[in-house]
Amino acid sequence: MPHIALDENLPGITALFAYRPETAAPLGQLAEVLLRGPSSLSVGERELIGAVVSRGNDCTFCSRSHAAVAAEALEGGMPVVEAAWKDVDGAPVSAKVKALLHVALAVRESGKSVGEDLIELARAEGATDVEIHDTVLIAAAFCMFNRYVDGLATLAVDDQDAYREAGVRLLEHGYTNL
């Protein structure tokens, strides 16, 4: 049960965005830029970063929502996401994405957990400074989103089809129209 009065028909961050539209707008814009804006990383790769960080933070709503978007955007779909959740190094993604996922998971622990070794590995796998920057910011933003969603005890539905439908909508319409 949510800690504050939220629309019980809206799960997760959508309920929070409805509750405070004035904070929803900049948060939605941040998500839009990070996950959908121009980038050498694909939408699927960026969504995968968010899904993996959210899973590491045990945020059911965010991990399942962004897994659904990543699954829609990545060749290989949900098995790719599930593999990354289980073992980044065993996931069927590029070596560069694996290295960036390790950076993202270090951010999840603490910003200071991102060591030069992780950055050098990402660079050695072809990651640019912009991709490293964006990975760190995506991971940090998802830590905030996860704590926002779970800190107010929002609802997380148990229906995977609902997440898949939301993933299709988010992929088509983005984050500024929630």
Image: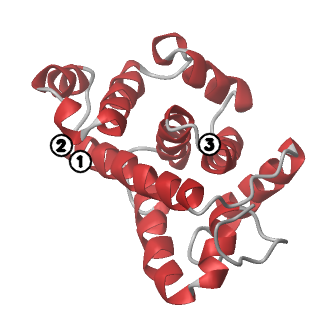
Whether residue 145 sits left or right of residue 163 in the image: it is left
Whether residue 125 sits left or right of residue 144 in the image: it is left
How far separated are the C-alphas under marks 2 and 3? 26 Å
SS for dot 2: helix
Say which label, 2 or 3, has the lower sequence index. 3
Which residue: 58% across, 69% down? 175
Circle 3 residue: 63
Q: Nearer the viewer, residue 4 or 13?
A: 4
Circle 1 residue: 133
Q: Amino acid at mark 2?
A: Asp
Nearer to us: label 2 or label 3: 3
Instruction: Give the position of the N terminus as an image quadrant.
Output: bottom right
Q: Residues within 10 Å of mark 3 (few under 14, many from 20)?
A: many
Whether residues under marks 2 and 1 lie with C-beta atoms below 8 angstroms apart, the answer is yes
Instruction: Give the position of the C terminus as an image quadrant.
Output: bottom right
Q: Quadrant of residue 55?
A: top right
Relative height, residue 93 to residue 145 (above, below): above
